[in-house]
Image (cartoon, rainbow, N blue to C red):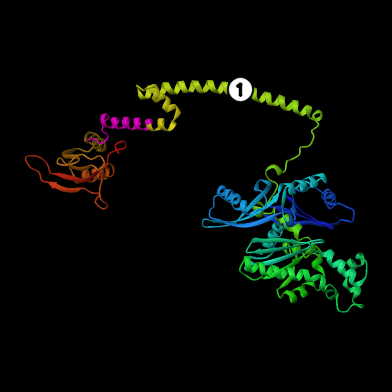
Amino acid sequence: MRIVGLDIGTSAVKLVEIDSAFGRFEIHDHREVAVFPGQDAVSVAGEALRSLPQPPNRLVVSLKSSKLTARNLQLPTRDRKAIQSAIAFELEDELPFPIENCVIDSAILAQVGQQSQVHVSATLRKVLAPELEKLRAAGIDPDVVTSDAWALRTLINRVVPASGQEKPLIVAQIGEQSTLFYIHWRGFPMLGREIAWGGRDLVEALSRRLSVSREQAENILRNPAMIEDSHPEGLISLLGDALEGLRREIRHMDLVCKGLCHEPVQRVFLSGGASGIRGLSDWLEESVRLPVERLRALSSLSPSGVSYAEMADAKMSIAAGLAMAQVGSDRSICINFRKGEFARVGQGRELDLAALKAPLIAAAVAGSVFFVSMAVQGRIYGRQLEEKDAQLKKAMSAFFGSVSQSALRTYLASPQSLKNSLQKELEKNRELARVYGPNPRSPLAYLKALSDGIPRDVVVDVMRFQVGAAAESGFDPKKDSSVTLTLLAADAKSADRLSSLLVPKLLETPKGSEKPSLEEVPASNGKPKRFRMTWTGKANFPAGGQ
């Protein structure tokens, strides 16, 4: 986004253009256009804007501090609506004119606990309306109309770290006909005061002192080397009386700082065209006994570290501050008098309807086809949904048996309720199946598996067969079934064979005890000698009986 800060002075128009994206910015261009005698500064500003390669996305201008008033208020609330009501209440007794005749804007600069620090600026409607009308007549329609003091506030916060603002700072913006004294403290604009003294007074004083024309005096101020031979005492000594007003006003601002902030001035910044006079900073520092330096606006702002000419730095302070007022977080709190009845209204361009006739007809036909298609599809899908709903109702009635119409509507409206009911019904049917269905772990099933596991050529007698829980224990489907099995075989070879066949299939035995206990039964009562085998352990039911 391209942002232009436009500073309309009496002798020159200053313009700074910034490219801003995602909180980052870059100084794209800066220009100074002279306003010659007989020219209107606003008209010159309009021509300067139209000379740009492309119109800016946002244009910021300012009102002079002499045309508005500002206050800093501390309000005991954080609620924005309450803050707006409190502002009107606080200003009603302080303004020397009816509040309904004012245009007011405010910015919340800090909030600590339930306290809010608010900066308020106000101007008269009869002052703002002619200014905007004059700008419009020159083809200038700004997005933001703020104050010179707010522009300097934004600039100082960008170029001076918070550690350098612990004590008040003074900016003396020396213009052609007036000088703005701005007091800044800890990020807050404390005061903006404009006096009728500027570079013109220095030119006239030098012209009288050297008995030269104004044009010659201006050239000497720009190039003091012209009088080094005739006046070795230097340029400042020739301007001593004319500079007395500047010195006296800075001393006065120092006293104001002690009254407002209860702190002495930490530093004085000089900006504007006259701030570049050789030796002015050193003379002021010695006179007012405060640190004085030039405000290098563009060089301090440049993110790439580019150094600009000293005069460009001196003259572009207001324009740079105006542009930076719409960059990053400063944009959301910027003082802007273009609100309410003075809000900017976008002007639409005239449309060539004849040229748009064919595209509009095509768009209308395409839109008609689209809506007809959507209507037909809606009818088809609606019928399909009705059929599916009827099928679903029929299936639910068959599954649940007797179900009311209200329950069916509930199930159709809430698939989750239908799912929960189906799960409950299925679980009930599973339980019934377990009760009435065959028991896959019955002793008969185990006996069948035992019979199937004995080879046909082996003859055995089953002496003992016990599967399941003990007679004195209750049934628990979660517990393993135990088995005790005793068989009689004709010889030891048959016993070993049965052990190798039956144990892995029907019995879970502890590791290392796969063989059953084997006991020889002597012959008696005409019966031959036999071998008794006994297995004891957990029953291993065949597949399907787990």
Is residue 58 visible to the viewer in this orientation of the structure?
no
Expressed as whole percent of the image width and height from the top left, the position of residue 148 reads 73, 57
Expressed as whole percent of the image width and height from the top left, the position of residue 299 reads 75, 64
Task: Name the one closer to the observer, 427 or 246.
Answer: 246
**Callout 1: SS:** helix
The residue wearing badge 1 is 375
Q: Residue at x 53, y 20 (%)?
A: 383
Q: Residue at x 9, y 43 (%)?
A: 523
Examine the rendered structure and indicate whether residue 231 appears above or below residue 318.
below
Is residue 513 rendered to the left or right of residue 199?
left
Q: Is 435 within the magenta?
A: yes
Few, some or many C-alpha atoms within 10 Å of disc 1 (few <14, some 14-19, many ≥20)? few
Which residue of the protein is positioned furthest toward the left in this rendering? 525
Looking at the magenta stretch, what is its main secondary structure? helix
Is residue 126 rendered to the left or right of residue 74?
right
Q: Quadrant of residue 182?
A: bottom right
Examine the rendered structure and indicate whether residue 406 appears above or below residue 498.
above
Residue type for callout 1: Ala
Identify the magenta region.
Answer: 421-442
Q: Residue at x 75, y 58 (%)?
A: 320
Task: Name the one closer to the observer, 332 or 354.
Answer: 332
Q: Is 59 within the magenta?
A: no
Expressed as whole percent of the image width and height from the top left, the position of residue 469 reads 19, 41
Expressed as whole percent of the image width and height from the top left, the position of residue 58 reads 73, 49
Is residue 197 visible to the viewer in this orientation of the structure?
yes
